[in-house]
Image (cartoon, helix red, strand yellow):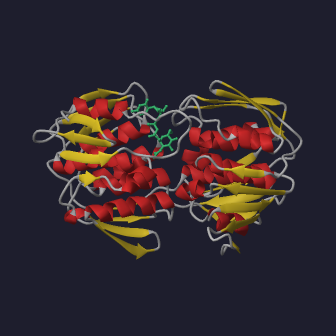
Amino acid sequence: MSKYIIRGGAPLFGSVTVSGAKNAAVAIIPAAVITDAPCRIENVPDIADVAVFFNILRRMGAQVRDAGDGTYEIDASGISAPVATSGDMQKIRASYYLIGALLARFGRADVAMPGGCNFGAPRQIDLHIKGLSAMGASIDVKNGVITATTQGRLHGASVFLDAPSVGATINIMLAASTADGTTVIENAAREPHVVDLASFLSLMGAEIYGAGTNTIRIHGKNSLRGGSHSIITDQLEAGSFMAAAAATGGRIEINNVIPKHLECISGKLCEMGVSVWESGDSSVVVEGTEKLRSVDVTATPYPGFPTDMQPQASVLLCLADGTSTVTDNIFDTRFKYVDELLKMGASIKVAGRTAIVKGVSALTGAQLKAGDLRAGAALVIAGLCARGTTEIEGVHYIERGYENMIGKLRALGADITGVSDTAEAESTAV
Ligand code: UD1
């Protein structure tokens, strides 16, 4: 799609099923490269980042078979050289997990620099390099290609991360899975997808302790075997639907979730006056309120409020009673979406890492441009609750990480239409 057209004002009602987690999928797919035995991965979300990753693997010589219903079989035995430099590498952030995975399998990786959402300042990879170097890798970055080499196997090491980087934690776990000896990651990221990757690597024969805490121990093995794994459901997709229900004053049931992963989001929504309750083991119900209350939101590493939900939270606070703050302690310049919300009549001032949001009585439809994935989701939510019509361009960002967002929203009663690249308006199937 090239743009979305939303006629706002319809409260969302009904139920929606959340897909597999993007950030887990893009860590688990490269893990399948560590072995030359086949792997089977279920609950893979149908999103652009996954399609790009599969293309990268195919170009490297792997076979990726779509077994239907979100299940894929990956056979990486055909990869003969640890080289991943195709143009697709720069389309996604997670392509850099091939550094850890190829080092683990071949003791060498030639990998193009990653792309991914641009929040305004360059996203560093120094912690990845520091961790892999401590394990014996020599790393050189030249002409946009990261070359990592080691003599023989990597060795276990003690790695303290200056910040609990998700990407660095995952890259080091991948590399350490076949290292000689034990690797200990201190100040490791605790996000759900780190734990999901640890589950998959364990099925492949790796020995990993402490995933989900800030100290992860990996006892390396000579090699890993194939494994079969079902990806966890997407905390951030669920959170985005929770925000959409709250923004429109609707009531929806969100199925196929892990309620524990949503506590950091539900807690804030409840503070705003939204009702959230669990329904069975894997569903939550979200019911909006007549008037949202102002709150202060601070994005911090898991189990704190996710940075990937702060743009959506800002939209809700645009409609709250009073003044709120949204502070991002992970990325210092993640507020480019604010300019778009201002076009809708929002009252927001950004001061450093904090957005000061003064509630207004309503947002008004406008012509908007999504600048990154979660900003795009936030603009969709803003369009759903705004008066009038909103047109959003740059929706390829949204499609990087949300499976069938239009279809799912339409099934909940939203008036949203996708316009295809050929400028022909189409209604996406519900
Ligand atoms: C991952 C998620 C992204 C999420 C982010 C924070 C994936 C594919 N992406 O991104 O959706 O927004 O976690 O939850 O899982 N940093 C450094 N040096 C490094 C690495 C990171 O300084 O080597 C800094 C970053 O600039 C940022 C902070 O650490 O300020 C957190 O980054 P990190 O957790 O690594 O995020 P990503 O893995 O890129």
| Residue 251, image x, y percentages | 77, 57
Q: Is residue 273 visible?
A: no
Residue extending farthest to the right is: 361
Q: Quadrant of the C terminus?
A: bottom right
Image quadrant where residue 265 sits: top right
Q: Is residue 119 above or below residue 376?
A: above
Q: Residue 75 or 412: which is nearer the viewer?
A: 75
Q: Nearer the viewer, residue 126 or 230?
A: 126
Residue 384, percent from left and from top: 77, 55
Instruction: Give the image location of residue 242, x and y in percent.
Output: 68, 51
Q: Residue at x 20, y 64 (%)?
A: 77
Question: In the rendered view, does 285 fall on the left or right side of 58?
Answer: right
Q: Nearer the viewer, residue 30 or 184?
A: 30
Rendered residue at 45%/53% (across/down):
91
Residue drawn at point x = 35 percent, y = 59 percent:
56
* Image quadrant where one finds the N terminus: bottom right
- Residue 220, placed above or below residue 250: above
The total number of labels drawn is 0
- Image coordinates for residue 396, horizontal then vertical, percent: 58, 58
